[in-house]
Each structure stands twice: as structure tokens, then as C-alpha cells.
Amino acid sequence: MEEITSSPAVDESRPARRDRSTRGAALWATLVAVPVTLAVAGFTFAKLAPDSPAAAPSPSASAARPQSTTPVELPAPALAERPATVCRALVSQLPATVRDLAQRPVTAGAEQNAAYGDPALTVACGGTPPIVQPTDEVWSVNKVCWHAVQEADAAVLTTVDRETPVRVRVPKQYEQPLQWVTPIADAIVASVPAAKTAPSGCSA
């Protein structure tokens, strides 16, 4: 008679439990690894990406910083009667601040010069008008036309559509120089008559 040998019963639930345990451990490892990977990626991006504009000091924050009140040294060349009258009118119309820069005294020619902030943004009325070449660019800001010259430490913008020229020197620390002449342009429109002629690039 054929002998039948019984084999130990196999618990089929064990592999299933082991599989579930293995999958659970892998899932936990993935959940932990993903935030770590994202954190590392975020840190790397922050280091490589340029500083955002929001990180720059706001005008109100800059205004809180102390600014020098010592007089700014400026020349005061003699002006003919008409330019001197126009320049006095301009100085009387200039704002007390240019953006976040407070006005400062000047060493000479307070009737034709002004200064703001530290380093000083300066305004000089009168003098010789700039020579504008046909290939030079001119810029219209608040109905005033400017000719710009870049120096080592500043941008110098001079009006080219006014009876009496006005020169504004914007230190390189102040980015986008044309934005700094906006309130000054308003004063120029109010006090300095337009010239009879202007470069072709100046808008009407």
C-alpha cells in the first residue's frame, strides 16, 4: 500500500506579511527621502539664483539710514542775467527729496546748484549745453529730453531741449539713473522754458 506522508502545513500568510512589511519600509524610506531631496534642491537653487528684488532695501528702509548733512562741494560759474533768473526759478521748484535722498546744502551757488543724499546726487543749472552727435541716444523723461554720458563713478544726464541746460550727476550706487531724474524733470518743466530747437530723437 502506498504510504502517504503528510508535509508540514505552509502558512501562506507569512510571505504576504513580509511583502507588506517590505513595501511599507520602502514607502517610509521614500517619504523621508523626498523632503530631504527637495530641501537640498531648494538650497542649491537659492544659492545659484540671483538675489530677488524683494531682498533689496525698500525706499522707506533706506530713508531710515543716516545721511550726511555736510555741504556738497560744487562749482558756481558766473551766469548771464537770463540763465541766472531761470536757475533761481528752478532751484525754488526742486523737491525736498529725490526718491529717498534728502536735500543737502552746497558749498557754492545755492541759487543754481542742489545736492541730495550720500553719495551726493547733484543738480547744476546753467553752463555750456552738451554736444549731441547724430548717433547719440537721447532720453525723454516726464517731457524733458536728456543726453547721458557714463563716467567711471556716475552717470551724467544733461537736458538738451531746454533754454538753459540742467545737469544731473547720478552716482553709480544709484541704479537706473533715468528713474532718479523724474522729480527733477517735473521741476524743470515748471520753471525752465523749452528751447527753440532740440535733437531729432527728443519727443514733442
Image (cartoon, grey):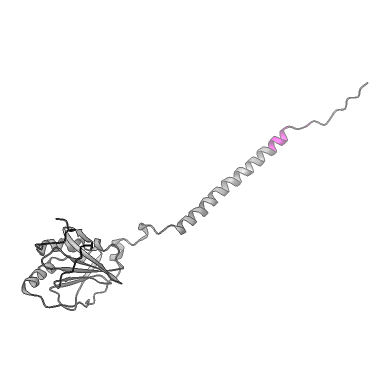
Q: Furthest-left residue in view?
A: 81
Place of residue 108 in the rendered image (x, y in percent of width and height, measured from the top left): 16, 78
What residue is shown at x 48% (from left), y 53% (from top)?
42
Q: Furthest-right residue in view?
A: 1
Q: Give, as a single range, the part of the protein colored magenta.
A: 9-17
User: Does 2 sit above or below residue 109?
Assistant: above
What residue is shown at x 91% (from left), y 22% (from top)?
2
Place of residue 104 in the rendered image (x, y in percent of width and height, measured from the top left): 21, 72
What residue is shown at x 69% (from left), y 35% (from top)?
16
Place of residue 194 in the rendered image (x, y in percent of width and height, measured from the top left): 10, 62
Place of residue 111 in the rendered image (x, y in percent of width and height, measured from the top left): 12, 73
Nearer the observer, 30 or 131 = 131
User: Does 10 sit above or below residue 98?
Assistant: above
Nearer the observer, 85 or 201 = 201
44 horizontally vs 61: left or right: right
User: Does 199 sit above or below residue 152?
Assistant: above
Looking at the rendered image, the quarter that the C terminus falls into is bottom left
Q: Furthest-top residue in view?
A: 1
184 horizontally vs 196: left or right: right
41 horizontally vs 92: left or right: right
Nearer the observer, 7 or 103 = 103
